[in-house]
Image (spheres, rainbow, N blue to C red):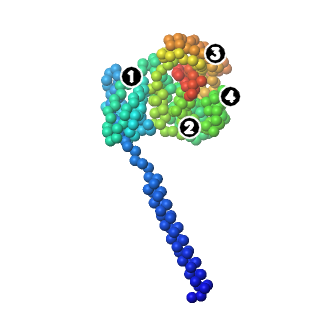
Amino acid sequence: MFKGETLFMKGKLFRIVFRLSVVVVGISFLLFLGGGCSPTPVSTGSIQGVVTDSLTGQPIEGVLVTVNNLSTPSDSLGNYILNKVPVGNREVTAVIGGYSSQTKTVEIIENEIIELDFQLIPLSQENQRVVMVELYIAIGCHNCELVEPILEQLVGEYGFDHIILAEEAAWGDYSTSEISDRYKWYLPDSADRGVPNILFNGINENWIHGYANYQTIKSKIDAELAKGVKIVITVDSRNSDANTTTITGTIENVSTSTLNNLEINGMVFKERPTVNLKYSVFDIFEKVPVSSLDPGNIVDFSFTLEGFNWETDNVHGVIFVQAPDSSTKEILQAAYVE
């Protein structure tokens, strides 16, 4: 065999060995990925129980029972069950409108079913939390047009003593400088100020950015309704003539703690049939600061509005108390003004 042929054969053999090595290494790497990156099985257990009314002892249907990212509603007999709950100490919360929410801590044991019952305390109609929903929209926004009728439907189902909806145009048609400033106050980062944005009693964990279906929105409202009441708003009077409206009333601290740095505020809205908006905001009041409010104390408020006829312009309004310095800029209570 000639020297050139020998070199050729050696080169060919080298290429074959090299290719085989690459294949072997590749298979080994895939086997490593398949075996080494498999998730470690999580030990889990279950929770089951019954949710009842603390006064009557009757079962409550539709209570949302939640632990971690798992949730389930109670059935017509008040029964619920949550499976595949990771072991360890877990906080379980039961929430439904008309009742105070309740949270209990329970230890989950592997492959065991833990019994956990809830007895929810009903809220009185006078001292029930009202959810103020602020829907930030823009005329022509497709997703806004999808969520807006869902919210209006929910207002019709719950009534104004449970939900008050304020539809605020973030920009474009029907926007005002007050609405724009309020939106920027809630969301300083412009990247967050797309539309639609749905805020439930402030910019809390229930905030929805973008489209959401009926059940998702309803669950957020129910979670807010179940929170305890700290403020009661009483609208004593609304006096209107052709150009001026005066709204008077009081706020009372019904909690057991002093509330600091509050603001009494309000909005007025009207129906705009051409764009299918029933609660289109056109004016936000000048806020009234309340530096401190002790338990049981009452503060008077009075707002005078000009430039429209409340009766003939089909105007409605809302008075609300907000804690602007709180982490969520929480609206503590709201009251509808007919």
Earlier residue among tags 4 and 2: 4
User: Mark 2 is on which residue type?
Assistant: His
**Label annotation for residue 177:** 4
> Is residue 204 shown left or right of residue 84?
right
Q: Earlier in the sequence, mark 1 or mark 4?
A: 1
**Alpha carbon of mark 4 to alpha carbon of mark 2: how far?**
22 Å
User: Please, what secondary structure does the residue beneath circle 4 have?
Assistant: helix
Structural distance between the alpha carbons of marks 1 and 2: 32 Å
Front tag of 1 and 2: 1
Q: Amino acid at mark 3?
A: Thr
Question: In terms of sequence position, does the residue under pointer 1 or pointer 3 come before the other?
Answer: 1
- In the image, residue 228 lies at what x, y percent? 46, 22
- Residue position for label 1: 121
Residue at image x 54%, y 77%? 13
- Quarter of the picture containing the C terminus is top right
**Above or below: residue 306 compared with residue 85:** above
Residue receiving disc 2: 209
For label 3, the SS is strand
**Which residue does the image show at 46% across and 33% down from the upper left?**
219
Of callouts 4 and 3, the N-terminal one: 4
